[in-house]
Image (spheres, helix red, strand yellow):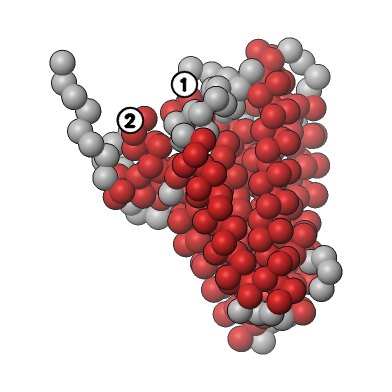
């Protein structure tokens, strides 16, 4: 009997960047152990995506663009760095939930290449909310806008870590959802969540006492709303799919951005 070689932290990070971004990272291992490390490291990929998002927004502001254009650019970067997979997953999940069909039929609808009316409406509203939130924050402060772009991206990937925890089943026996469903131990998922919240608080504190509180609260709100969607999908479809992971990520990011506009 051949034993599976031990997984290094680099295997996990390669899995995270290779599956969650379009960055040229070669994934050497696709087993459950590598998937576990990858999903635990998903917020690290989010940090890189968020840095790119903030960087492009700040560059446009520096060149004289307004906060609205900077916000559009910041929203475009995560979409480009994921080939739009999370947005596509959000649309497919909306179509599946909105179909009112039995689980098998809903899953079949989600696998179709076209996007239905529920998906289109959800995409439009979510993208508008993300752009509007970031435009408001950039208009208030370039530093807060940059932090919001990073926090939104990290919150989205933290939601993926939590959605991949043990006890959450896959709806299908194949696909990315099945590859990562249930791979993350619950204590590990909670530890990553606590680390992200602490990092958000420290980053927010650099901008003032209000942001030291608001930033981790935004992250928490994002993962709570994502968890509600996750539970709804598990009840509706019998488990998670790659599309559900995309929907969870976009829900978390949008919620975090909206909360960061409040109380300013």
Q: Is residue 120 visible?
A: yes
**Which residue is found at the position 26% from the left and 45% from the top?**
8
Residue at figure coordinates x 73%, y 43% from the top left: 225
Quadrant holding the C terminus: bottom right
Nearer the observer, 196 or 111: 196
Q: In this view, does 104 lie above or below 230?
A: above
Q: Is residue 209 shown above or below 184?
A: below
Quadrant where the N terminus lies? top left
Q: Residue 147 carries which label?
A: none
Q: Quadrant of residue 67?
A: bottom right
Going from the N terminus, do you reach mark 1 or mark 2 first? 2
Specify whether 195 is left or right of 112: left
**Mark 1 in CB contact with mark 2 (< 8 angstroms):** no
Q: In which quarter of the image is residue 145?
A: bottom right
Left or right side of 154 for 101? right
Observer-nearest of 86 and 230: 230
Q: Which residue lies furthest to the left in this view?
A: 1
Q: How crowded is mark 1: few (under 14 residues within 10 Å), some or many (20 or more)?
A: few
- Circle 1 SS class: loop
* Residue 176 appears in the rendering: no
Distance from disc 1 to disc 2, alpha carbons, whole Å, reads: 13 Å
On screen, residue 71 above or below 29: below
Residue 179 placement, left or right of 153: left
Residue topped by disc 2: 31
Q: Where is residue 61 in the image (x, y as percent from the top left)?
A: 65, 82
Residue pictured at 48% horizontal, 17% vertical: 173
Query: Disc count in the image?
Result: 2
Q: What kind of element bears circle 2?
A: loop
Locate residue 151, reporting x and y percent: 61, 62
x, y percentage for residue 83? 52, 48
User: Where is mark 1, residue-wise?
Assistant: 174
């Amino acid at each position: 009997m051949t034993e599976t070689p031990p997984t290094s932290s680099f295997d996990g990070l390669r899995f995270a960047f290779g599956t969650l971004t379009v960055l040229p990272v070669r994934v050497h291992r696709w087993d459950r152990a590598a998937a576990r490390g990858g999903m635990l490291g998903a917020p690290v990929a989010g940090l890189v995506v968020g840095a790119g998002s903030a960087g492009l927004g700040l560059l446009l502001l520096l060149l004289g663009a307004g906060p609205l254009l900077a916000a559009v650019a910041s929203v475009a970067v995560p979409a480009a760095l994921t080939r739009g997979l999370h947005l596509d997953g959000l649309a497919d999940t909306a179509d599946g939930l909105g179909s009112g069909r039995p689980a098998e039929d809903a899953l079949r609808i989600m696998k179709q290449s076209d996007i239905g009316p529920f998906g289109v409406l959800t995409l439009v509203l979510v993208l508008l909310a993300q752009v509007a939130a970031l435009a408001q924050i950039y208009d208030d402060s370039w530093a807060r806008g940059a932090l919001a772009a990073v926090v939104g991206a990290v919150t989205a990937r933290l939601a993926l870590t939590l959605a991949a925890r043990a006890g959450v089943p896959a709806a299908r026996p194949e696909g990315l959802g099945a590859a990562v469903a249930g791979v993350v131990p619950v204590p590990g998922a909670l530890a990553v969540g606590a680390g992200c919240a602490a990092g958000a608080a420290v980053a927010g504190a650099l901008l003032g006492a209000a942001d030291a509180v608001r930033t981790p609260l935004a992250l928490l709100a994002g993962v709570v709303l994502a968890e509600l969607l996750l539970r709804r999908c598990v009840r509706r479809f019998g488990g998670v799919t790659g599309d559900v992971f995309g929907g969870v990520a976009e829900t978390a990011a949008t919620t975090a951005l909206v909360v960061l506009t409040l109380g300013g």
